[in-house]
Image (cartoon, rainbow, N blue to C red):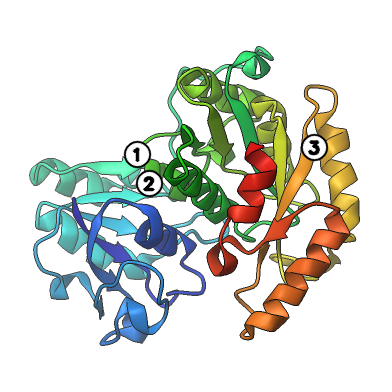
Amino acid sequence: MQIAILAHEKFPGRAKTALGVLRYADYDVEAVLDRDSAGDRVADHVPDVQDAPIVAGMDEVGDVDALLIGIAPIGGGFDESWRDDVRTALERGCDVIAGLHYFLEEDEEFAALAAENDCELWDVRKPHEELTVSQGAAGDVDAEVVLTVGTDCSVGKMTVSMELARDAREAGYDAAVIPTGQTGIMIEGWGNPIDRVVSDFTAGAVEEMILEKGDEHDYLFVEGQGSIVHPAYSAVTCGILHGSMADQLVLCHEAGKEAIHGYESFSLPSIPSYVDRYEDLAEPVSDATVTAGALNTSGLEDDDAARDAVGEYADAIDAPAADPIRFGTDDLLEALLE
């Protein structure tokens, strides 16, 4: 499928959905829409993902099958400055894929244009209606379940999940991703958007996916969300932890991060304390341990400084650690798959 990605004024720093799709999805990306960077190329900003031209609007994009909204703003709202581009895409018969809490199919203008031009509005964050409470059965599957957890939101849990699963498959292991957020669902083409699920059904929505895939693969890498200490998102984190009944945890952190994203008046607890917090919270339903750690060192320009930071992080959590993007996943997979 050929797509364009909308990332206005947020690429690349605040367009993690766009980056995830560019790095991991099977789509052919024809263009990225960003008014501030029009005329550049993706490679001018991010060297290790699929390259594409950056343009100012949908009217500068050639033939594509779909427009994908590649921004996941806090609160998941729709920015009205995007409306012209979505309208243009629909008028051209393109599907529109969005991971917002604002559902495009409930927008009267977009719904009418989609019907008129025989195209689809795929609201990735809209859960199906048959979800129910957890039965406490995820621990019965044959697969080893590995969950990425974080010291905060937006520290790389989706990226780490994708990197580990991809590299495990390349090493000959039968591994799959359990997508729980809009970016993972867009990449994998299926999944449950956990942060949109009724709270009583959160663990059940994760369990449903584990049971669906758990006897088909040897390893399941579950995409984590939020953080157990986050003032807004801790409930989602707990639901995934208990619903997955994980065997192993990978603790994800961003080098130099000291305050909670979006709630900067709240400081992060000490790194070692997270190990006890996650293991103690998991303990009633599983014997999950923090087996490895992933450190996002993208804010450090020097490789030597990044290696030192990874070493300090490994010492802090008393487990192997790596930056999967910068230094690969070998050390992590050796610990997780042994």
Mark toward the viewer: 1 or 3? 3
Do labels 1 and 3 touch, CB within 8 Å?
A: no
The residue depicted at 40 percent of the width and 77 percent of the height is 47
Query: In this picture, is 8 found above or below 241?
Result: below
Disc 1 residue type (three-letter) = Gly
State the image coordinates of residue 97 (x, y, percent, origin top left).
31, 49
Query: In this picture, is 296 found above or below 273?
Result: below
Disc 3 residue type (three-letter) = Thr
Residue 139 visible in the displayed image:
yes
Do labels 1 and 2 touch, CB within 8 Å?
A: yes
State the image coordinates of residue 269 (x, y, percent, origin top left).
88, 59
Residue on which the image places disc 1: 189
338 and 313: which one is in front? 338
Query: In this picture, is 206 found above or below 79?
Result: above
226 and 173: which one is in front? 173
Label 2 to label 3, Cα distance in Å? 29 Å
SS for tag 1? loop
| Label of residue 186 in the image | 2
The residue depicted at 11 percent of the width and 57 percent of the height is 91
Disc 2 residue type (three-letter) = Met
Query: In this picture, is 215 found above or below 307?
Result: above
The residue depicted at 45 percent of the width and 47 percent of the height is 166
Left or right: residue 248 versus residue 116 is: right
User: In the rendered image, which quarter contains the C terminus?
Assistant: top right
SS for tag 3? strand
Label 1 to label 2, Cα distance in Å? 5 Å
> Sequence order check: which comes first, mark 1 or mark 3?
1
Residue on which the image places disc 3: 289
Mark toward the viewer: 2 or 3? 3
